[in-house]
Image: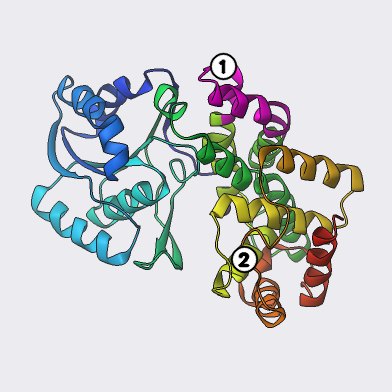
Amino acid sequence: MVTPSLYLQGKGAIYYLGQKAFQYGDKAFVIGGATALSVAGERVKKSLSSNGIDIVGWNDSVKECTHVAMNRLIEEGKHAKPHFVIGVGGGRAIDTAKGVAWKLKVPAISVGTQCATNADTSSEVVVYTEDHKYLQTLIAPTNPVLVIEDTEILAKAPVKYMVRGMGDALSCKFEGEAFAKAREKKKDGAVPTMAALALGEACFKSLMEHGLKAVKDMRNGIHSTEVEEIIEAIKLASGMAFENTGCALAHALHNGLMKTGQIKGEHGEIVAYTTIVQMVYEKRPRDEIKQVVSWCDSLGLPMRLKAFGEPSKAALRMAVEHAAEKDMDSKNMPERMKPADILDAIDKVERGI
Ligand SMILES: [Zn+2]
């Protein structure tokens, strides 16, 4: 089981950044997006300087995690010789920082500023093209050593990010369970730990119980226990659940749909939809599916494909063929998938199950 060495969450957690990072050295390379560093940059600087850490590199121009952006920053890093790289922001900035730290052979540290992603805790680096087309997922040899989630900052980010993060986090229980069944059946790799499966379950329970209240509270500027719970469910529970199990149909279909070029939407929104498709495909109990669909509805997570564009029949066929046969996550389903069965599950979701 892989995890960060230290996960620190709470109001004002960012002020512990310097104190906790110091054990890794005293030269920091800070990488983030413009918005994230305008929000959290001063606090990052203060925490580092008060612990005697020099900022030897500072880049606030990350817009996308691309090979070009990472290579440019790796070159900067080779001259600056940092002892660690700190990624500040959402998935794009944090993945870029993890990729740069990996190539510079120094630890990565994550400081989250919004909830759309669980990249902060994970070792995955998701690489895109300049125009935000998915390219590949690389796995860094280690997770970020330190993850700071200052909930004062996260709770003030736009609510839509938390909704998207919940949509993505919804998948981890169902994909993790499929993954575990696949490994038991195929005996072609290690079965996941009980801990990883329990995290997926805990994440799901937290989303169902606290998700709506957390969103409502965030909209009203109330920093409640539910807001804290959901941040943990997204950042820690879903991050470590998915990374220590694997993705399955939900993400394979997401990837297939994106490949058609006829689908537009945020990752978490599409994954919430494809998670329902996976549940229907697996013939899970109707009540369980209905509970999740109505939860998605009340959060405003779209439950119809037309919300993401209207893919042609041929495009949809291409998407399900990719999901069933070509996507690397397809091997994590217990049985070989049939494209026609996925199409059938989509059809049922479209008709309101
Ligand atoms: Zn995802």
Mark 1 vs mark 2: which is more N-terminal? 1
Q: Circle 1 sits on which residue? A: 224
The answer to whether mark 2 is within 8 Å of ligand 1 is no
What amino acid type is highlighted by mark number 2?
Answer: Gly
Give left or right: position of 23 versus 301. Answer: left
* Residue numbers of the magenta segment: 205-230
Other residues around mark 2 within 10 Å, as few (<14) / some (14–19) / many (≥20): few
Q: Quadrant of residue 267?
A: bottom right
Query: Which mark identifies residue 309?
Result: 2
Furthest-right residue in this view: 286
| Foreground pick, 268 / 176 | 268
Q: Residue at x 67, y 38 (%)?
A: 299
Q: Quadrant of residue 37?
A: top left
Other residues around mark 1 within 10 Å, as few (<14) / some (14–19) / many (≥20): few
| Foreground pick, 300 / 34 | 300
The quarter of the picture where the N terminus appears is top right
Q: Position of residue 72 (x, y in %)?
A: 19, 61
Q: Position of residue 124 (x, y in %)?
A: 45, 54
Residue 97 within the magenta-colored segment of the rendering = no
In the rendered image, is residue 122 in sight? yes
Dot 2: what SS? loop
Q: Residue at x 48, y 40 (%)?
A: 3
| Foreground pick, 39 / 57 | 39
Q: Position of residue 218 (x, y in %)?
A: 54, 25
